[in-house]
Amino acid sequence: MEVLLPAINIGYLILPPHLLSEYYRSQYEFQQTTSRIEQKTLELFMRNGHWERHRFRMKEIYKKKYGTIINAIEACFKDKAVVFKGQTGLHIVLEVITSEKEENLLQKARKAGINLYSLSDTWYRQANNPFINPMFLLGFGGLTIEEIENGIAILYRTWF
């Protein structure tokens, strides 16, 4: 399922043919609460090809932002950080090469106005966390190119 517009809670499923009969049997369990007008608008948006054009445009924008955050980290942090590069998404995972505690870095970043997330917070059992260095999840989807570049520079100055 891909969520399109979180504000109106609408998404869609693309099912292989062999699952369609199962979906039709259980479709009422999904409790779609989005208005029919919004659903019909989305249907027309997709049917008329606007969704594909929008996805392509957004893919190019996010590709540029992804490149910007990678380049900014490499330029600022050099050997003091490692980026776990993915092929898609609007976040990167950043390993910071330091002896400072993750929580301290997180507090410093937030004090400087940088929002990021500690990866260790995602582990149910901290003992299973295989990482030695602090690890962070950085989102860039809602930022401009300038905000990404400035944010990474601020983050580096804040931590080092």
Image: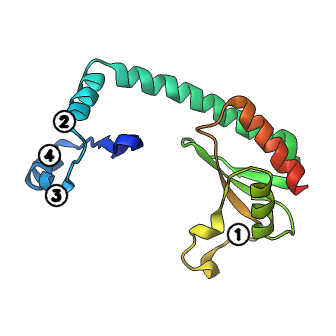
Callout 3: few (<14), some (14-19), or many (20+) C-alpha neighbours within 10 Å?
A: few
Real-space CA distance between mark 2 and mark 3, rounded to the nearest whole angstrom: 17 Å
Q: Nearer the viewer, mark 2 or mark 3?
A: 2
Please tell me how crowded label 4 is: few (under 14), some (14-19), or many (20+) other residues with Cα within 10 Å. few
Q: Is residue 3 visible?
A: no
Lateral position of residue 125 relative to residue 158, left or right: left
Answer whether labels 2 and 1 touch (C-beta < 8 Å): no
Q: Earlier in the sequence, mark 2 or mark 3?
A: 3
Q: Secondary structure at mark 2?
A: helix
Taking 83 as reference, is 53 left or right?
left
Instruction: Say which quadrant the C terminus sits in.
Output: bottom right
Q: Which residue is mark 1?
A: 131
How many angstroms separate mark 2 from mark 1 (CA)?
Answer: 47 Å
Q: Earlier in the sequence, mark 3 or mark 1?
A: 3
Q: CA distance from mark 3 to mark 4?
A: 14 Å
Circle 3: residue type? Glu
Give the distance between the C-alpha atoms of the residues marked 4 and 2, in whole angstroms. Answer: 21 Å
Label 1's element?
loop
Residue 79, x across and y down, in percent: 87, 51
Q: Which mark is residue 20?
A: 4
> Callout 2, which amino acid?
Arg
Kindly identify the residue that appears in the image at 65 percent across and 47 percent down.
85
- The picture quadrant where one finds residue 130 is bottom right
Q: Return the mark for residue 29.
A: 3
**Element marked by disc 3:** helix
Residue type marked 4:
Leu
The residue shown at (85%, 49%) is 156
Image coordinates for residue 95, horizontal then vertical, percent: 74, 58
**Circle number at residue 32:** none
Query: What residue is drawn where x is 54% and y is 76%?
Result: 124
Q: Nearer the viewer, residue 79 or 77?
A: 77
Nearest to N terminus: mark 4 or mark 2: 4
